[in-house]
Image (cartoon, rainbow, N blue to C red):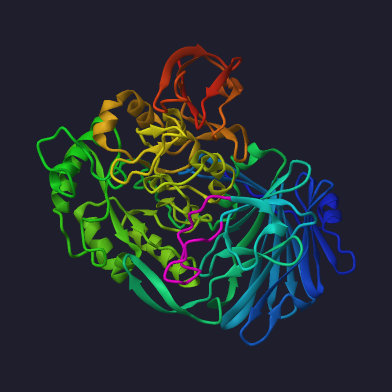
Amino acid sequence: MKFKILVQLCLILPLSAAFAQSGKTYQVKSPDGKINVKITEGAAVSWSVKHEDTEIIAPSEISLTLADGEVLGKNAFVKKLATTSVNEIINTPIYKKDKVSDNYNQLTLNFKGDYGLIFRAYNDGVAYRFFTKKKGEITIMNEEANFNFKDDAKAFLPFVNDYRNKDKFNVSYEAHYDVLNISAVKKDTLAFLPVLVDEASNKKVVILEADIQDYPGMYLTPGASQNLHGVFAPYPTEESIHRLNYVVDKRADYIAKTTGTRSFPWWVVVISTEDKQLADNDMMQRLAAPSQITDYSWIKPGKVAWDWWNDWNISHVDFKSGINVPTYKYYIDFAAANKLEYIIIDEGWSDDHDLNITKLDVQQIVDYGKQKNVGVILWSTWYAITRDTEGLFTKFEQMGIKGFKIDFIDRDDQKTVSSLYEIAKKAAAHHLMVDYHGMYKPSGMQRTYPNIVNAEGVKGLENMKWGVDNQPGYDVSIPFIRMMSGPMDYTPGAMRNATKDSFRPVNSNPMSQGTRCHQLAEYTVFEAPLQMLADNPTIYMKEQESTDFIAAVPTTFDATVALDGKVGEFVSIARKKGSTWYVGAMTNWDSREISVDLSFLGDGTYKATIFEDGINADRNATDYVKKVITVTSKDKLTAKMASGGGWAARFEKVQ
């Protein structure tokens, strides 16, 4: 069901008052009246945001600078304004819930000079975007996007710290959060979005971007006082291959060349009064461009037996394991036995730069998979897939490939962003799904092209191979920050689990930080329509009890309820598919007990299958206990989690 209400300014007096002009100041309020956005015209356009009595964003100037010297947002004069109130339901079949409420008030300001600004106020945040109505093509030299804070708030910032080829905009988008006051952020550092700011009165703010099409993504860097402002990658003019990366050697002095009549990206501020609200937020679905796909029947989310993380380390077989047909038949047999939908053939099956040069009989593997009802997904570098996208997609569609995992993108300049949308469009025409690994945050792209079933932009399990500190603390931060931007190709599922003291980096037989139940919980907590089983089939078969639980967790859901949580400390989330509920809870390196209120279950009696940390999980992180009990919505359970621990449960309705 879908409905939309457009309310004219003259029809509803309360709304009319909310949008009233006072001199050169305009306002738009959220439907519940708690959020107020003020916009001031004049020598400069500025915006500010207030939630109840808290100033969330202090007056902050915004503008677009064009190549001809015109600055959209300076010496600004409003010619016309329009107001709209919208309340609609968006159907979201490949998501953490099947429907999303889209309820907002909108103010559109048309300025002298053929440009304007749109401001939206939701009950849980605000967003704005520029639009232009100019002839021909325009060149954007820079965009001024400021987020001024009244107080010296604490921020969770994922800093760019791994420049590729000495270009500071060639990055992996993988970083733990540095938590520090805005005033302490070093000059000239770059943080990629999303960024969380801890405001006063327990309110938290997450800065996001949405609908980034034909435009670069935004980074944040500190300015004067308590300011964070946008920085954008200039357009690439010279590129070269550096191993697997297609890197930039030279950039222009502008950030985008684009059509003169268009809407620009949304810059977004989400506001919460409880941390758990951030773990169930739908802003990306609301603000992304609508789906360009009408037939979803061929897009089949699911789980994947993945080869690369476990280094093809299967054993107790009569063949040499590696990148060969017998190995992938073994993976297919495992997937079929556990009702997993796919396997991935990761790097090594072809030349890294030319997918027509193959080192493996892929067709034989695909044909074997068809016999077992298991699809095959192929890995590719971004460069390789762009050499002849149409030709390659035609070839591999005919072969029976179900999709591509496209890796080593590592940029979000205008050229890269446009390329990823074009790849998604062409893939959809060939009924191919896309997992954008080595990518920036998805920023709503997966609503526009639902065949994009996952995206990385997260410091996932692969980093365990090389060693990191405090991964459990990161794991209970990203549901409130990174996950707000869209699904995450985190690739969970480690069966070799380690305590804080026993963990060490191992490349070929890697382990995870935290307990077995921490890994099991990730399958419910982390959003991923295409979700990996990162460890090897041999160990999964040895740990069949854990494997059975993982295999039963869906990858898309009908409903989601964020139960509890605190950024960087713990999280608990419930999700529903059909009549069955799934709950995942995780903690950082601190052991803790939390209460799980089962009121979300509704009527009926449920069989609860629960995995919780064992009594010795503080010494052996693989230790767990499985329990099967009967519960109703009136019950409250205690989830006891060891250091780096977790708690995972499935609730099946029995009557």
Q: Along the line of sight, which residue is nearer the eye, 385 or 29?
A: 385
Q: Along the line of sight, which residue is nearer the eye, 543 or 9?
A: 543
Q: Position of residue 581 (x, y in %)?
A: 49, 26
Describe residue 441's horizontal placement relative to residue 62 as left or right. left
Describe residue 491's horizontal placement relative to residue 191 as left or right. left
Q: Residue at x 18, y 38 (%)?
A: 330
Q: Residue furthest left?
A: 318
- Determine which quarter of the picture holds residue 614: top left
Residues in magenta, as a range: 159-177
Q: Is residue 175 magenta?
A: yes
Q: Residue at x 34, y 70 (%)?
A: 242
Describe residue 70's horizontal placement relative to residue 308 as left or right. right
The quarter of the image holding the N terminus is top right
- Determine which quarter of the picture holds residue 601: top right
Q: Along the line of sight, which residue is nearer the eye, 72 or 513?
A: 513
Q: Position of residue 266 (x, y in %)?
A: 62, 61
Q: Residue at x 33, y 72 (%)?
A: 241
The total of numbered circles placed on residues is 0
Q: Residue at x 31, y 52 (%)?
A: 403
Q: Does residue 356 lie above or below 372 as drawn?
A: below
The answer to whether residue 86 is visible is no
Q: Does residue 472 lie above or below 546 as drawn?
A: below
Q: Is residue 230 magenta?
A: no
